[in-house]
Structure formats: C-alpha cells, structure tokens
C-alpha cells in the first residue's frame, strides 16, 4: 500500500497545533508516529490497535500515557482524526 496523502480533520489539526505550541517533545514523538503510520499503517511504534463500535475502521496508537492518535486509512491516504486525549 502506497500512501500519497496525509489529511487532518479540523479537530486533529487543532490538536497538532496545540502540541506545536505547548510541548515540543510530544510533537517530536507524534511526528515519528505519523511517519511510521505512512510506512506501516497497521504495525509499528505506539502499539497500533484497531478500534471498535462507533470508530470501526479506525486505528489508534499511543503518543504517551494519556494521549492517542486516532486515524483511518483509505486506498492511498491517511486521515488523522485526533491526536490529543484518549478516544
């Protein structure tokens, strides 16, 4: 699977901007995870796990103890749904 595009929902973009302003260390971890998602959407760092119920077809990875990145994968793109807090 070749990923050509990474998109952020409005909520995810707001979360990402929060990390840019508030915590550069977490931002660095988040960027590593996003790069890993591009290479390996369903395996890799951050303990990837498929979500259920309302978030079916979405995946989650740990950023730190209390924050997760939630994303979905389409044919050629990744859509980041959130990257702060726990789903």
Image (cartoon, helix red, strand yellow):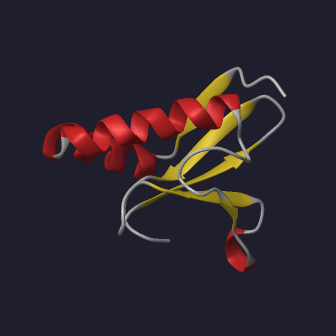
Residue drawn 67% across the image and 62% down it: 49
Quadrant hosting residue 35: top right
Q: Position of residue 36 (x, y in %)?
A: 59, 34
Q: Position of residue 7 (x, y in %)?
A: 57, 34
Rendered view: 53 above or below 44: below
* Residue 50 as seen in the image, left or right of residue 17: right
Rendered view: 47 above or below 14: below
Furthest toward the left, the residue is 22
Q: Position of residue 18 (x, y in %)?
A: 24, 47
Quadrant hosting residue 50: bottom right
The residue closer to the viewer here, 65 or 34, is: 65
Q: Position of residue 59 (x, y in %)?
A: 67, 58
- Quadrant containing the N terminus is top right
The residue closer to the viewer here, 21 or 67, is: 67
* Residue 12 as seen in the image, left or right of residue 34: left
Residue drawn 52% across the image and 36% down it: 34
Residue drawn 70% across the image and 20% down it: 4
How many numbered marks appear? 0
């Amino acid at each position: 699977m070749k990923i050509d595009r990474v998109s952020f929902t409005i909520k995810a973009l707001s979360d990402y901007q929060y990390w840019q302003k508030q915590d550069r260390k977490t931002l660095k971890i988040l960027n590593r995870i996003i790069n890993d998602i591009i290479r390996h959407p369903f395996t890799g760092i951050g303990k990837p796990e498929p979500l259920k119920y309302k978030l079916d077809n979405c995946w989650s990875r740990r950023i730190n103890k209390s924050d997760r990145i939630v994303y979905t994968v389409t044919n050629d793109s990744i859509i980041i749904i959130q990257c702060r807090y726990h789903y």
